[in-house]
Image (cartoon, grey):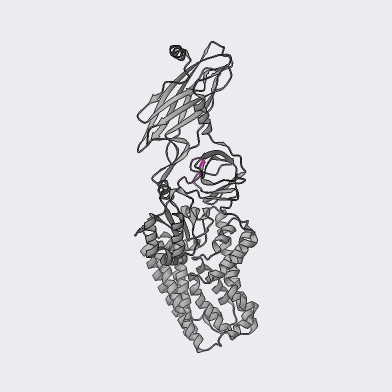
Amino acid sequence: MRLVLALLLLLAPIAMAQPFTTPRSTTTLLSEATSVAPGQPFRVALDQSLSRGWHIYWSNPGDAGAPPEITWTLPEGATASGLQFPAPSRIAYGPLVNFGYQNSATFLASITPPASLRPGESLSITAVANWLICAEICIPEEARFTLTLPVEAISRPAPGQAGRFAAAEAALPRPLPFPARIGFAGSAGALEITALPPGGLREAFFFPAIPALIDNAAPQPLAVEAGRLTLGLTRGTAPLPSAIEGVLALTDSQGIRQAYAINLPPGPMPALTPVLPLWQALLFAMLGGLILNLMPCVFPILAMKAVGLARLAGEDRGQIRAHAASYSAGVVLSFLAIGAALLGLRLAGSAAGWGFQFTQPGFVALMAWVMLAVGLNLSGAYAMAGPVLSGQARRGHAGSFFTGALAVLVATPCTAPFMAVALGAAMALPPLPMLLVFAAMGLGLALPYALLGLAPGLASLLPRPGLWMERLRQALAWPMYAASAWLVWVLAQLAGPHGVALALLGGLLVGFAAWALGRAQRGGGRLARLGALSAALAALALLPVFLGTTPPPGLNSGPYEPWSAARVEALRAEGRPVFVNLTAAWCISCKVNELVALDTAAVQAGFTTAGVTQLVGDWTRGDSAITALLRAHGREGVPLYLFYPAQGAPPVMLPQILTEGIVLRAIGGAG
């Protein structure tokens, strides 16, 4: 019986070409059919088994590589389809991320024989396959395969091949059965899937069909809530096509992976966090603006507010209302201006977030000079119209208005509780509701001062003006000098020693302008006024020079490493926990958190005990990859703290105001 079976196998038509074998791989051309029928399609498969450590590539190979190709030689009248690629995996190599396959891969194609064939004849197929196989080095390989299959009236399946072809078909991406949309805004983007079935989802990744459409190495943060999946994306350099194709790979909590084919027209960017109702966004914006009064970056402006409040104690109700309205208008209009600027930059395709102006050395230098000028005014070097800045009994309200505007500008290095959620919601809203959220934030910041306009009688509770007010005014100049010195330190991180030298020169010119203006106000004549104007213009003329400055090289010390998406991926692939700190030199909230909650001995010991790798992303001068990561988590500015637990669990986003307990509980809870 065994002999008969062996003879039958020897006499059976061959449904597999001679394998091509190298030390790196074994490649075979298989046929689904052992005989074919005229005009009836059948499938063939290019099957590759790879040696350990070697990989081949998907149709879009990612940052490097080349996909397999096959050239057919067929009889006249026969046709062949293109290769069907199974869903790929990410293959990280240093800072690059490639898309391809390890261990094995099977590529399907369909062959249609000529309808003119007759039973008893044979169909001869020749295929020349080329592929690039890589490990530490890359080697191009080529193989020639020939299949000769008999022609019968009805095709017959090849024995033992059904399971192999079924597995290859299962590895292909399926049509997406859920509603979906995809869109980009500047360098950030998102893919949204709705009506997902219930069940845990551990990981998702989008593989674009077009090379360089997205930044392959950038993280794709996943958010799942109430059947809605949102995957953050980062734009690459390729132009946006009319339809975005690719593969979405989803891995559930049990480790089962499903792949779906994506073909969607690009549209508005989906919100990366659940969009708040407008009323809730407005409420959070007002609360965030109100709390912003207590943040450290606004402390210098509180000095000017204190002087203004003291001066208002002696004014009538009409003057109190007018000054409160002027200050509030300065705050609200400045918030609207920032919102409009962010909207314009976003529509123009630029990456900009909360505090974006502090990434520009020229702006930081200008703010340092303004703080110095305000301090000199409070010290009595010169007088400025308006009670908020000078304390003089003048009826003009420009000082109150511009104090409000200045309060907003120096507040942007801070992000108060509720603000981050409100800002994230605002950037996902249409233009008019977005600007309403920024106006509500301004109203919250101005609220303590605006209360004087609603209830002017509160001013009667303040002490009456007197000599004490002059002494207080001069004492409050020192927080302004401290703010100016801090901004020069920030400038050192942005523009290096050359930038600091320019800032000091500009500060000298500002000081001379203030002295000359004071002399002119005390009867110094036109020459003193001309000197003040010339010095101020000379300082402003220095601002374009800051465009040519370069930041100093980053210094890594202690347990910190620089953040990169590739480094996060590599650490997570090893199953290690990771703490990501996105910060900036000008972000006072960040520095306070680092002082009281991150750099303490207890927290550092906790990181060490848990084996946590600490990565720091520096947004001081702006960075498109960090901007994309911020927006992927619904944030428009720093700080952002992410803790990635071990073994690939989803990241935990920590609050923007930290304590030692919050950080230690996050580490311990994940552990």
Question: Which residue is more in the foreground, 474 or 9?
Answer: 9
Estimate the x, y position of residue 322 in percent, counting from the top left: 63, 78
Q: Is residue 134 magenta?
A: no
Q: Residue furthest bottom?
A: 467
Give the image location of residue 531, x and y in percent. 45, 77
User: Eyeballing the image, is 668 above or below 517?
Assistant: above
Specify the principal SS of the magenta part. loop
Q: Do we see residue 97 in this rendering?
A: yes
Q: Which residues are magenta?
A: 207-219
* Residue 442, horizontal then vertical, whole percent: 58, 68
Residue 599 shows in the view:
no
> What count of labels does the image hold?
0
Quarter-wise, where is residue 319 in the image? bottom right
- Rendered position, 171 above or below 647: above
Quick check: 504 left or right of 419?
A: left
Q: Farthest residue toward the top? A: 120
Task: Give the position of the C terminus as an image quadrant.
Answer: bottom left
Can you name the residue that lies furthest to the front here?
Answer: 1
Compared with 58, 458 (above or below) is: below
Which one is nearer the viewer's eye here, 391 or 466? 466
Residue 34, compared with residue 626, is above or below; it is above
Please report the residue visible at 56 percent of the width from the left and 83 percent of the height from the top. 311
The quarter in which the N terminus is drawn is top left
In this view, the residue in front, 255 or 621, is 255
Q: Identify which residue is drawn at 43% across, 68% down.
A: 487
Q: Position of residue 598 (x, y in %)?
A: 41, 63
